[in-house]
């Protein structure tokens, strides 16, 4: 089986690794860094900076734990080095693992040249002869021919493929009215880390990415204004969850402009101004756009193989992540499903198994409604499964129980009792349907609820679990009682 993966992010890496272990002859094409946007621009760099900002916040609250007040400062150069070091170590680790499994790694841009033909334009510095060498690809797999790779014009390779996976991710959405210069008007990809710590940052967009940046830069010392186009931050989340985050933002001095939609940006002598549709104007030293993303589907040659794409650029797929052309797959952000690295990785695993014929029997498909997600603000936010507001909108009968962090001895010991644990269950059967957590370590604690939702556990199963004392996880059992 000749399997070509285009895109080395979470979906592509997982698919390549799984297929290679199952015996496929795998070629992975990546033009930037193994690990993809999640490592280079998104999840890992942002969470590394958030961790630094979070430590600053905790140190500033040291008096609550009986310590003398401290005033930490941010070393931007050291922070940038830390972010780059984490990126490098993760990418190197993944590259070494793939090569040890026999995956061929091509540094370049891949596109379809027909239903079973993939054209790879190599990056400068990687000539075709080098790309075809065993050292570039890793050890060849026994019994698998290497034919089908032809040197074309010196720096373009043509590969024959039995199956192809596109996992090219997405890019920040930049509206026509925004002149992004990477200096004072930033997209998210200019902010890991930024050129300087902004004196006053105006964040446009109050979704997951926007609120994480608000928390990050406020913790690093910036004054922050957040433009909220709706009447609450996180418009897709539980209103009670959003209200908890808004309260924390206001307490920390963040300016919230609700019901304001940005329509333009003006660069002035010593500031940048964001113009809103309700005539409000917000000035700051820098502007950061966090208004979603668009799939990176341009230039993939999809039309050459008859692969259909939506008007938004996503590539529709079925439950196997197959496109309308059965041997061509799409995963990750490109597929238009949940834009989560965890989801992309599992999609990649499922694609590899399907390519290798392991899904000819009954198996469990991905249930995107049961995917856990987290927002790394302060306090952290995490949820999974059915939300309370969603259940009411559907007219579904549910039981909702909530325990505040203030009732947790561990939260009081740690000096941070903000937040709560909320469980949603079926009143007739007791089966856990979902849950939300606001508070310290929410991203870790939600894993217990996610397991309960996936495995159809009952609240009694959580209530009778013997958790550690004192620990934040005890709140899960208390919410289940």
Image (cartoon, rainbow, N blue to C red):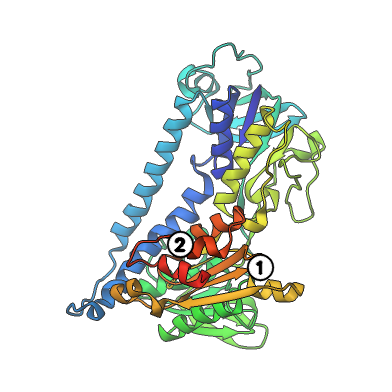
Residue under the point 62% across and 62% down: 431
Helix or strand or loop: what does disc 1 sit on?
loop
**Which residue reaches farthest left?**
68
How many labels were placed on the picture? 2
Give the x, y percent position of residue 103.
Answer: 52, 26
Residue highlighted by disc 2: 445
Circles 1 and 2, Cβ within 8 Å, touching? The answer is no
When the figure is inspected, residue 92 is found, relative to residue 49, above or below; the finding is above
Residue highlighted by disc 1: 426
> Left or right: where does residue 329 sit relative to residue 40?
right
Give the x, y percent position of residue 114.
Answer: 77, 29
When the figure is inspected, residue 8 is found, relative to residue 84, above or below; the finding is above
Helix or strand or loop: what does disc 2 sit on?
helix
Give the x, y percent position of residue 241.
Answer: 55, 76
| Residue 177 or residue 119, whichever sits in front | 119
Residue 184 visible in the shown view: no
């Amino acid at each position: 089986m000749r399997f070509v993966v285009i895109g080395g992010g979470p979906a592509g890496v997982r698919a390549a690794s799984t297929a290679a272990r199952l015996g496929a002859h795998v070629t992975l094409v990546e033009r930037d860094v193994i690990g993809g946007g999640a490592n280079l621009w998104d999840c890992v760099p942002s969470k590394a900076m958030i961790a630094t900002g979070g430590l600053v916040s905790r140190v500033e609250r040291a008096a609550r734990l009986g310590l003398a007040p401290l005033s930490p400062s941010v070393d931007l150069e050291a922070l940038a080095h830390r972010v780059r070091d984490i990126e490098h170590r993760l990418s190197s680790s993944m590259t070494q693992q793939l090569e040890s499994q026999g995956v061929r790694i091509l540094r370049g841009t891949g596109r379809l040249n027909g239903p079973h033909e993939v054209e790879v334009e190599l990056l400068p510095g990687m000539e075709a002869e080098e790309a075809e060498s065993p050292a570039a690809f890793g050890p060849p797999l026994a019994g698998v021919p290497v034919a089908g790779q032809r040197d074309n014009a010196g720096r373009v390779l043509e590969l024959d493929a039995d199956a192809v996976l596109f996992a090219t991710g997405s890019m920040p959405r930049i509206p026509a009215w925004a002149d992004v210069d990477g200096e004072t008007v930033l997209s998210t990809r200019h902010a890991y880390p930024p050129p300087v710590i902004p004196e006053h940052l105006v964040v446009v967009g109050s979704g997951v990415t926007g609120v994480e940046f608000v928390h990050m830069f406020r913790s690093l010392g910036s004054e922050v204004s957040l433009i909220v186009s709706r009447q609450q931050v996180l418009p897709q989340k539980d209103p009670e969850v959003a209200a908890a985050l808004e309260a924390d933002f206001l307490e920390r001095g963040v300016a919230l402009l609700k019901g304001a939609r940005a329509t333009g940006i003006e660069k002035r002598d010593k500031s940048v101004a964001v113009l809103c549709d309700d005539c409000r104007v917000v000035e700051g030293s820098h502007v950061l756009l966090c208004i979603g993303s668009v799939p990176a589907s341009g230039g993939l040659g999809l039309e050459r193989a008859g692969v259909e794409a939506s008007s938004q650029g996503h590539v529709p797929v079925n439950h196997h992540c197959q496109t309308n052309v059965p041997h061509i797959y799409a995963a990750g952000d490109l597929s238009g499903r949940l834009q989560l690295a965890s989801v992309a990785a599992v999609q990649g695993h499922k694609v590899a198994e399907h390519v290798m014929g392991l899904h000819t029997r009954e198996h469990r498909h991905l249930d995107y409604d049961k995917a856990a997600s987290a927002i790394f603000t302060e306090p952290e936010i995490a949820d999974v499964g059915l939300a309370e507001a969603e259940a009411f909108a559907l007219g579904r009968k549910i039981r909702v129980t909530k325990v505040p962090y203030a009732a947790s001895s561990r939260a009081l010991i740690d000096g941070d009792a903000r937040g709560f644990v909320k469980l949603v269950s079926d009143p007739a059967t007791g089966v856990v349907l979902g849950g939300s957590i606001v508070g310290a370590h929410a991203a870790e604690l939600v894993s217990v609820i996610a397991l309960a939702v996936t495995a159809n556990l009952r609240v009694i199963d959580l209530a009778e679990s013997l958790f550690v004392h004192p620990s934040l996880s005890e709140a899960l059992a208390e919410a289940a009682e």
